[in-house]
Image: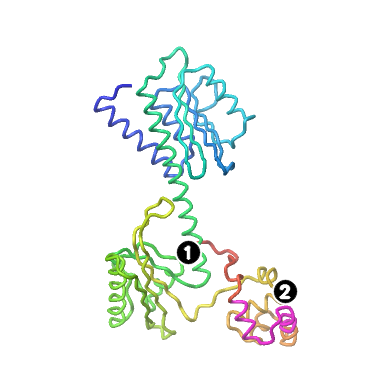
Amino acid sequence: MTFHPRSVVEFGLFFNRVFESLLGGAPISRSADLVREQLSAAAVAIRIDGGQNSERSLLVISEQAPGGPPAGQGEQPHDHQSADETRLAQLLETSYQATATTLNEEDGTRYSLWVFRDLDDRGFDAEETSVCEILVSQLRRGMELSTRMGNSEIERTLYSSVMDRLSVGVVILDLDGRIVNRSKTACDAMADHDGLRSQGGRLRASYAAEDRKLQQIIREVTRSVADGETMVTRGLSLSRPSGERSLGIIVQPIQGGVREGVSVAPSVAVYVRDPDAVAEVEGELLSQLFDLTPAEAAVVSRLTTGLSLGDAASSLDISRNTARAHLRSIFSKSGITRQSELIRLMLNSAVVLGERPHQQIA
């Protein structure tokens, strides 16, 4: 395979399609299809032997054969008795082949690529074999980067959902002070324009004097990140036009770098807390964590929202005496004797991290 200038460009575009397919989360069979089509091959096989993590082992075969299985047969767990393994053995015996392998020395994962042509077709020259070696290295790089990016997204989603359940809003700013991301709780707080809002893609306070202070703090923190100085964290309170208690704001730097192979840009996190917000607790989880009956869990759930025992009884349509009986039983099970201590225990427990009914993760 001799590359003249135009074919080099074509190969570059082909390589980008393969790499973007992997980063976009497409199945590996799609990459096998692209390789087979570009190299005019009868079949392409990609195998990943997971080293210490056997669950990562899989074999993918993309094959174009009259009356045979469609291209990109899918991804099957690594199994020496599988039909794909049998087919790979047949191709190795009955076809011209170009083979390349690369190894991740950290975890022992081996990536192998086979490109096959029929015996009545031409074989593979040295240049085509070199292309396969480049491809398998980039397949490995794309797959590992895709996995790391996926893990980072999972981590970000979990972090955001936990902060939402704790009633803490998070706004991420770039080093120019522009909003690049925000959690559901932060979106809700800003939508009310009650102490904090978004204007022109930037975070603004409701009152001019407080907004000047907020912008000054954001500049201080972003400057410390950009200049590589000692990281600074700043806080302030923002008054609310509604007359409710002030929002608490923490502005904190996020240092950039490469984490798990993924480049992370330096940025700034702004945490928003409404002092009147109450983390909701789910009754079934209360029952599981503290061995409460459904009726007892219902009483506790009402108390943690700030209701008095009498109001909790009314909302549950039970008598005050029945609510007191439930409360005594709860005290006995939890080993505490005061209602305020009970509420603190519940709100500081793992129960607030549980997903509430019909709630979607932002």
| Residues at circles 2 and 1 in contact by the CB criterion of under 8 Å | no
Query: What is the x, y in percent for residue 203?
Result: 33, 71
Disc 2 is placed on an element classified as loop
Residue 329: within the magenta? yes
Give the magenta range.
Answer: 326-347
Q: Residues within 10 Å of mark 2 (few under 14, many from 20)?
A: many
Residue in front for this viewpoint, 28 or 239: 28
Local packing at callout 1 (Cα closer than 10 Å; few below 14, some 14-19, many 20+) is many
Which quadrant of the rendered structure holds the N terminus?
top left
Colour option used: rainbow
Q: Tag 1, which secondary structure?
A: helix
Q: Residue furthest left?
A: 5
Residue 316 higher or lower than 4, as above or below: below
For residue 69, side relative to residue 266 (left or right): right
111 or 88: which is nearer to us?
111
Please name the amino acid that badge 2 sits on. Leu
Numbered circles on residues, count? 2
Image x and y of residue 127, in percent? 35, 23
Indicate which disc residue 292 carries: 2
Q: Residue at x 66, y 87 (%)?
A: 338
Question: Toward which corner of the image does residue 297 lie, by quadrant?
Answer: bottom right
| Residue 160, numbered circle | 1
Question: Which numbered disc flags the more N-terminal residue, 2 or 1?
Answer: 1
